[in-house]
Amino acid sequence: MSGRTLYEKVWDRHRVATLPTGQEQLFVGLHLIHEVTSPQAFGMLHERDVEVAYPELTHATVDHIVPTASTERPFADGAAEEMLGELEANVREAGIEFSGPGSGDQGIVHVIGPEQGLTQPGTTIVCGDSHTATHGAFGALAFGIGTSQIRDVLATGCVAMEKQRVRRIEVTGELGPGVGAKDVMLTIIRRLGTDGGVGYVYEYGGEVVESMDMEGRMTVCNMSVEGGARAGYVNPDTTTYEWLRETDAFRDDPEEFERRKEYWESIRSDPDATYDDVVEIDGAAIEPVVTWGTTPGQGTGISEPIPDPDDLPDDERDTARRAQEHMRVAPGETMRGYPVDVAFLGSCTNARLADLRRAAAIVRGREVHPNVRGLVVPGSQRVKRAAEEEGLDRVFAEAGFEWRGAGCSMCLGMNEDQLEGDQACASSSNRNFVGRQGSKDGRTVLMSPTMVAAAAVRGEVTDVRELEPVEVQTA
Amino acid sequence: MSHGSRKTADDAGDGPAETVERVSGTGIPVRGNDVDTDQIIPARFMKVVTFDGLGQFAFFDQRFTDDDEKKDHPFNDPAHRGATVLVVNANFGCGSSREHAPQALARWGIDAVVGESFAEIFAGNCLALGMPTVTADHESIVALQEWVDAHPDGEIEIDVAGETVRYGDHELAVAVDDAQRTALVEGVWDTTALMGANGAAVRETAESLPYVELDG
């Protein structure tokens, strides 16, 4: 019998029953909830007069609508205040732990799970948010669900799913200087397409992924969904365990850590595991990637020309033409020199401490271009505090960036942080969809945090390799 | 709200049990690949705590200018008023997990979507609302969209069990995901009720997991 993948092992451990639909009932080890997609689910529960089955396995925070200038209550935005109030009432009634604005632990749900040690290998994690795939970086099986499924999980502790195929994505070799996890993921999506992952879970491996820190792995897994895969994961290893050892879950309990580690080791994919598909990507060939269009698959290396729609496969031409019209770019040009009005460093993809450190090394001793509004939105209150302890806030502020509070912010423009008119934004977020950042004429160029820093400084899309990083002294 | 009278999900095993074997109505085409959830419903309309009233915001930024003037879009076209069958291209519904997207479409009046392919979470969210998402190849979908343009009052009939779409003199073979077909045809798409019935097995699974710590 051939070996099994992590996906199969974790699936089997959590499988409760086969449903009459042929779907399988999967037990959920951790249910994360936030203010945008959960209130309707609690409403459905109230309608049915059903209570939350496993509040102890549920954790809430507020991220999408939270203001990043001041979290003083009530929020200036009445709709945002109402959503937070609704969430507070729901978690209070159900007895669900809540990392709220006043807790010091609030932040983007996909940042706080890993930093609090809630996210662990071999667990099943769901959240009403497609970027739940992020948690796969720890070897968890994690995926986004809709509101009716949130109702299912609240009511039963389970989700109904069909088992998927597993594609191993092997990133070989070594990345060049200035190239990071975001460039790797944008390359994968460009290569396999925005719908290439439909029906698959992605297992990321190879030397490049194995040598990434946890933040890098989270960046990769985060954008699995932009490639059409509902979940992606990396097998847990020493890097994973070292992160977990320092979290709230295990800091004071080394014995429990050792016990859990046995389980974590046991769910790694076997060396002789078979995959439904294997894709190999040469890490050394990847250069900094930026998007030129309005889907995350429309990316190009910084020195490569923007493609001519006529040269693309039939089914990509129309989308490419409309995207180029929206972005006002022409085939044959590179994205280098594309003027930007806003530089956004934030989101569940790239707003962790390591991301901010790398961006600060580019920013240090330089200034944000006078035509650019630069925003840094740390992924969580803890990230913000840790960055301030290292003096990163001063590096950004002295360069002319706004140093803001934690939340989803300009990634999707549900708070006051939005593009205006047809502004172009160099963004470390995950989606360049038309209208995504709050203005339907806004233009988003996705890139790594260091590339955002470079674009902020130069006022245009820039190859970060032209700017010498200055390591920030950590306190 | 009296906490004591609340039930657990296995007492509430009688959710809606209607079946969705067939959907029929006039069609409405929305063209383009990768139509994402931010286009279907922009995030600013999700600052709400219920799904009520989302229908008016479906495709809002494609339908209206900054000055709220109507743009050329099928959802603004009087010829398609009352349409229930949405016809789309590839990777429809990609992006966010927001159930607000199918909710907005359903509340606008859409009962079923026929397309080349769908993003997974979107299709799952549609199923939770009892809204079929059936697929056919590119040429067949383009032909159906053109037919709908020419026959905005023409009836389209989706047979979920038989996996066919009939329109005019045409019969198109379509694919329906197995679980979706069973769920809709047999009326077993209320997964809360289905899974709530297995409460004891859930507890057993939970207790077998080395990392799960239950209260009481």
Image (spheres, coloured by chain):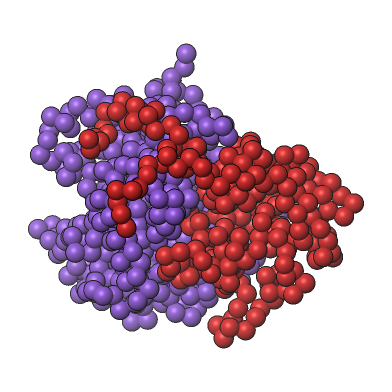
Chain colours: A purple, B red
Taking depth in this image into account, of A243 and B164 the one nearest to the observer is B164
- Between B95 and A466, the one nearer to me in the picture: B95
Residue A84: % across, % down: 31, 65
Q: How many marks?
A: 0
Compared with residue A4, is residue B141 higher up or lower down, i.e. above or below? Answer: below
Residue situated in front as seen by the camera: A331 or A355: A355
- Residue B81 percent location from the top left of the image: 72, 70
Q: Farthest residue in the top direction?
A: A1
Asked if B75 appears above or below A386 in the picture, the reply is below
Based on the displayed image, in which of its 4 quarters is residue B77 positioned?
A: bottom right
Q: Quadrant of residue B24?
A: bottom right
Task: Farthest residue to the bottom: give it.
Answer: B67
Q: Which quarter of the rendered picture does the C terminus of chain A lie within?
A: bottom left
Which residue does the image show at 55% across and 54% down from the upper left?
A: B94
Taking the spot 82% from the left edge, 49% from the top edge, the residue there is: B166
Across and down, in percent, residue A383 comes to 22, 58
Direction from residue A123 to residue A1 in the image, left or right? right
Q: Position of residue A442 (x, y in %)?
A: 49, 74
Q: Residue at x 66, y 56 (%)?
A: B111
Check the image and name the residue furthest to the right: B169
Residue A427 in view, yes or no: no
- Determine the residue positioned at 23% across, 64% down: A101
Residue A105 in sight here: yes
